[in-house]
Image (cartoon, rainbow, N blue to C red):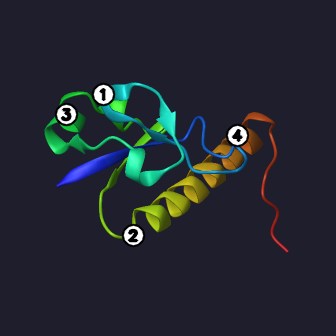
Amino acid sequence: MMFLILSIKWSGTHRGEIVWWQSNAEGYTTEIPKAGRYTAQQIAERPDYYNNGRSTLAIADTGNVFAAARCALAVADAINAAAGMIRNGEQRRSA
């Protein structure tokens, strides 16, 4: 199975679009056909580079890669928001 690398770092900053790595980590694209494909072995050998969950996320190249990326970005946004609340000392209050 091949994977596309989602740039969490740059997605949303480019006209709100999802941003992918190109082949050989040589730039970025918003077009899935132009996105690079990476092997599971590449990702396993360097998970902090290809799939660290902070700035990058490996998404399986399936017919629904766009939906998976949107879901992943929503989760990343929620995690970042929660981390910000914790840093700022905010607490969730029960109704």
The amino acid type found where label 4 is placed reads Thr
State which quarter of the image contains the C terminus.
bottom right
Residue 14 position in % (x across, y down): 68, 41
State which quarter of the image contains the N terminus.
bottom left
Residue at label 1? 24
Residue at image coords 30%, 56%: 60
Residue density around tag 3, few if under 14, some if 14–19, many if 20 or more, within 10 Å: few
Residue at label 2? 64
Q: Earlier in the sequence, mark 1 or mark 3?
A: 1
The front one of 80 and 20 is 20
Left or right: 61 in relation to 14: left
Circle 2/circle 4 CB separation < 8 Å: no
Residue at label 3? 42
The tag on residue 82 is none
* Label 2, label 3: how far apart the Cα atoms are: 22 Å
Name the secondary structure under disc 2. loop
The amino acid type found where label 3 is placed reads Gln
Left or right: 58 in relation to 95: left
